[in-house]
Image (cartoon, rainbow, N blue to C red):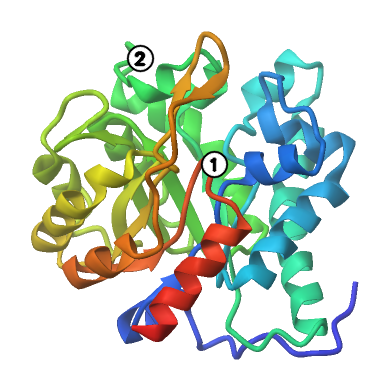
């Protein structure tokens, strides 16, 4: 695969960009794939398409880049060796699919540059929580009954594969539990790739019930972590969390909430109405958010609004 338009200089790291100002994240991968007609009613969720229709994933990334996103989050959130093994996919093939998730986002960035998009583009390799592999809603509860050491052993192998695929950053995302965050922070050491850590929260606590100031403090002195924050939460919970994250860690803050609708894990359906508006991002930015986008049910149109809002500001 070749590109006619060069990538941004290697020295233009995401950390450098965050120090200079706001950077736009993409939106939900699953809703973009579903809007294109793909069935994701599977335990592997969007990760199933890595094996079956990888071109669909690249197109979803491209749609967000064209909408104004600077960062694409890969489709590896629910991709694990254990999850693939349940579907009869062996270790080597699972490793190939994990690496492919990064390559597809990189290819979408190349296509975007070939189309003349001039804004900087980066790829974030998604690392979802242990509960995402279980596919039973426990990613919104945490407290799996595993030790920190056991969680570290679960996460490290796929982190190694994803890091070897050379993403710009590792997205340790939708983490419901400070214990799992500690395991992930241990697991990223020595990989040579920066990371961000974002919790899934309810109010001023993690989904597992820990105070956010204690949860964010875990990453304060971790050199690998270039941003901390929240994702896959209600938009109304973001601003207070941003303030806490910025105060406790002194790092740039990452935020990408859901649309405001509520996920019913048993029915596997979204309920309620959207409460997400692009104007909310100005308050988040003022509180310390620098990496801003959307998660579930936030599509390219909303990301375009975020980009316009931040540019105007």
Q: Nearer the viewer, residue 96 or 153?
A: 96
Q: Is residue 116 left or right of residue 307?
A: right
Quick check: can you spot residue 95?
Answer: no
Which is more toward the observer, 273 or 75?
Answer: 273
Picture coordinates of residue 84, whole percent (x, y) = 72, 24
The residue under label 1 is: 297
Residue located 60% across and 32% down the image: 78
**Residue pushed farthest front?**
273
Q: Which of the pair 46/171 is nearer the observer?
A: 46
> In the rendered view, would you say 20 is above or below 98?
below
The residue wearing badge 2 is 144
Image vertical order of residue 260 relative to residue 142, above or below: below
Q: Please state which of the two labelled residues, at mark 1 or mark 2, is closer to the viewer.
A: 1
Query: What SS does tag 2 mark?
Result: loop
Q: In this image, 260 relative to 307: left or right?
A: left
Q: Vertical placement of 285 versus 245: above or below?
A: below
Question: Does the image show residue 229?
Answer: yes
Residue 281 location in percent, x, y? 33, 64
Q: Name which residue lies at 28% across and 70% down.
A: 282
When asked about the image quadrant of residue 301, the answer is bottom right
Helix, strand or loop at disc 1? Answer: loop
The quarter in which the N terminus is drawn is bottom right
Could you tell me residue 16's position as x and y percent?
39, 83
Q: Residue at x 53, y 62 (%)?
A: 303
Q: CA distance from mark 1 to mark 2?
A: 26 Å
Callout 1: 10 Å neighbours few (<14), some, many (20+)? many
Reading the chain from its start, which is encountered first: label 1 or label 2? 2
Q: Are marks 1 and 2 in contact (CB under 8 Å)?
A: no
Q: Identify the residue at image location x=46%, y=17%.
A: 137
Relative to 292, 41 lies left or right? right
């Amino acid at each position: 695969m070749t590109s006619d338009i060069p990538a941004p200089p290697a020295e233009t790291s995401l950390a450098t960009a965050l120090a200079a100002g706001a950077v736009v994240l993409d939106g939900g991968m699953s809703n973009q794939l579903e809007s294109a007609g793909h069935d994701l009613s599977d335990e592997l969720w969007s990760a199933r398409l890595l094996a079956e229709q990888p071109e669909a994933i690249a197109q979803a990334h491209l749609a967000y880049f064209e909408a104004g996103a600077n960062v694409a989050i890969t489709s590896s959130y629910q991709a694990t060796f254990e999850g693939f093994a349940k579907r009869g996919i062996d270790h080597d093939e699972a490793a190939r699919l994990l690496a492919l998730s990064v390559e597809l986002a990189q290819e979408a960035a190349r296509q975007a540059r070939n189309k003349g998009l001039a804004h900087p583009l980066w790829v974030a390799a998604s690392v979802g929580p242990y509960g995402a592999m279980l596919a039973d809603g426990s990613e919104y509860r945490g407290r799996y009954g595993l030790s920190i050491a056991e969680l570290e052993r679960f996460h490290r192998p796929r982190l190694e594969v994803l890091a070897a695929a050379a993403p710009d950053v590792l997205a340790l995302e939708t983490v419901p539990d400070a214990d799992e965050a500690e395991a992930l922070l241990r697991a990223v050491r020595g990989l040579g790739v920066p990371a961000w850590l974002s919790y899934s929260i309810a109010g001023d606590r993690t989904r597992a019930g820990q105070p956010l100031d204690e949860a964010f403090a875990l990453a304060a002195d971790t050199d690998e972590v270039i941003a901390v924050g929240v994702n896959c939460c209600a938009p109304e919970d973001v601003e207070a969390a941003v303030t806490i994250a910025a105060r406790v860690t002194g790092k740039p803050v990452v935020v990408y909430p859901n649309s405001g609708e509520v996920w019913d894990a048993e029915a596997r359906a979204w309920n309620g109405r959207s409460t997400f508006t692009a104007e909310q991002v100005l308050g988040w930015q003022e509180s310390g958010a620098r990496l801003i986008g959307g998660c579930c049910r936030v599509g390219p149109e909303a990301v375009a609004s975020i980009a316009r809002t931040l540019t105007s500001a």
